Structure formats: C-alpha cells, structure tokens
Amino acid sequence: MGTLQLEGLTRRYGANTVVDGVDLDVAEGELVALLGPSGCGKTTTLRMVAGFVEPSAGTVRIAGRDVTRAPPHGRDTGMVFQSYALFPHMTVAGNVAFGLEMRGVAKAEREARVLEALRLVRLDGLAERLPRQLSGGQQQRVALARALVVNPAVFLLDEPLSNLDAKLRAEVRVEIRNLQQRLGLTTLFVTHDQEEALTMADRLVVMEGGRVRQVGTAEELYERPADLFVANFIGRVNALAGEVSAPGAFRTTDGTTLPCPRDAAPGRATLCLRPEKLRFQPWASAGVPAKLERTVYLGGQTEYHFTLAGMAVMALRETPPEGDRLRSLRPGDQVTLDWLGEDARLLPEAVP
C-alpha cells in the first residue's frame, strides 16, 4: 500500500474555480473522507486523484511518485464509482478480471486473484452471474472486488453507497470499513452523508466552495469546529449572535446574558452550542427564560424547540418515561435553559 499527497490541487473551468488549492496528506492504511454539500469540489478532487480530470495547478503524489500527469491506468489506484459502472454483458468474474486483463496479467494468476477478490467481498459463489441477476448490494460488492483485485496503492470511493436503501447502506458501510482496515487500504472516500463520514473515516475533510474548511477526526470537528460552516455541517448546532461582554458572559443582540467560556476574548462572535449540551427545566427559577415552541418525538430521543432571546434553539434529550413531568410540557410553556460555559464554543461572527 502507499500514501497520498495533494499539494495546491486546483481545477478551473474558465473563470470558475471548482477546486481551489487543496492540500492533504493521507497516511498509509488511513481512510479519509471528503465531505461537503453538492458542488463543493469533493468529487472533482477525487477524479483528479484518479486521473479522470486534469488539474489546472498542483501536484498529486501516490507512494511518493508524482502522478499528476499520468493516465488513470498508470496511477496504481482502484476506484469504485457511484453508479457501479459494471459491464452488463460480462459475468461477475469477467467484470472483476477486466482490470487485470488490461494490465496483461496471465490467465492463471488472473483467475486466482479474481477468486480471492470475490471471496473477500463474499461473492465467491456468484462468479458466473450477470449484473442484472444481482441485487444492488451484490452489484456494489462486485464493484469493490473489481477495484481491490488490482492491489491498488490507493483505494478511491466516489459516493459508493448512495444508490442503496438506508438499511443496506448501513450494512455495506460496515463491510467496507472492516475490509479497509483488514487489508490496510489507503483510502480516499467521497460522501455528502455526515453519518457515513463519521462512522467510517479516520479523518474528515470538510469542503465548501472548492476549499478545505477543516481537517480532523470526527470528534475534533464536532467538538471544536473551526468556523460556523463546519459547526452547522457536522451535526446540529444552536448558533446565537452577540458579543462577549465579560469573562464567562455572552450578551445576545437583545441584551440577554448567557454563559460562555471564561477565557473567551471580548468582542462580537457567534455562540455555538450542541443540542445535547443544553439543559432545561420547567418551572425552575435559575437559568435563562425561554418558551417551548414544539416537541419532536424521535423514539428514544425527543427534540425540544424553544425561543430564547428572540432566537430559535433546540435541545435533545432522551425521551422521558411515562409519568415524568416533562411529558406534560406543551407549546407555549415557559422553561429555563442553562448549560456549562465550557460546553459553548465561540466562533467568528461570519464565515469568510
């Protein structure tokens, strides 16, 4: 296996810059997810790594070798496409063997490697079937086997689960992650799905407008987002505008004082608080007054939506048991909200 380095990777289409100076190092055996909304540049970045899109500037190195201008077949990568891209007239074995044939691998070795790849993805009994005779999950496994059989230095996944239903998607992502870890595959994975990225990746790269907003582990991005865009994109967040008026005190635009970290620098900022950090009590005297607008029952958890200082905030709690007085809360009821100052994060007032 190898490593992957991107240095200043850029792609322009006329005056439109789709990817703007991306720098990224992927260590051997690491799975890194490119995450962001549609049009953020993540798929174009992946396709530049694969060799299907030529960079306008920058460098791609695989295992230390500059492959920026190399053709796709000369990069030592294996790619799984969103659409699977299986040949409908070929059997499962034929699809998996195709890349080996293009590389001139001898028939005996080719057959042995195909059988091993199919065994890895648990399809060794379906080698002679055609793609149309397979389920969506099985077709996805064929695409995985086809990418794995060439023993790539870097494994590339372009939203490979987006065509599967929710239950199957959850199952296949576990299989992909287990396979990646077992084989030590250096992997770059593109997704717009936060849950996929959070559950599969060693590190996440959040992109927006062709630029990298932040790189880090799931915990780092969730607990310590670099800016408001990342805070909003990774999970859910309450964002309140105002300013730090004193140590541990944040004043909203209407003058309400809220707790914040004591070491926060004075000045205008956005106070960000994750819903599970927000505590509330009906009929209590301590805390900040708020009005309940609605509740959303989610089974094991319930969302509570409030108006605080003229702004909407949301708390997330385990659904209270029958008989708990929180069950009697109704829209319009008054409560008090509170949280630990250190649980809030102060971010720049606006995203540049």
Image (cartoon, helix red, strand yellow):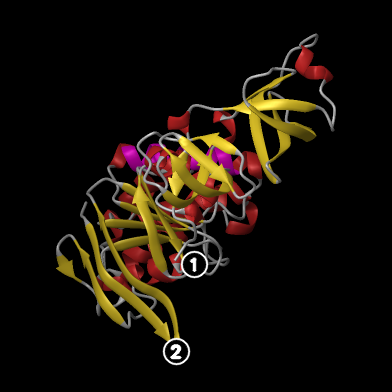
Residue at image coords 35%, 60%: 78
User: Residue 131, percent across and down?
Assistant: 58, 58
Image height of 210 relative to 266, above or below: below
Q: Position of residue 260 (x, y in %)?
A: 47, 35
Mark 2–mark 1 distance (CA, rounded to whole Å): 16 Å
> Percent from the top left, x then y, of residue 7?
24, 68
The picture quadrant where one finds residue 153 is bottom left
Q: Is residue 148 left or right of residue 164?
A: left
Name above or below for residue 48 compared with residue 330. below
- In this figure, which residue is indicated by the disc labeled 1? 40
* Label drawn at residue 162: none
Residue found farthest to the bottom: 14
On the image, numbered disc 2 is attached to which residue?
Answer: 15
Q: Earlier in the sequence, mark 2 or mark 1?
A: 2
Q: Is 33 on the left or on the right of 305, as rendered? A: left
**Nearest the camera: 177 or 267?**
267
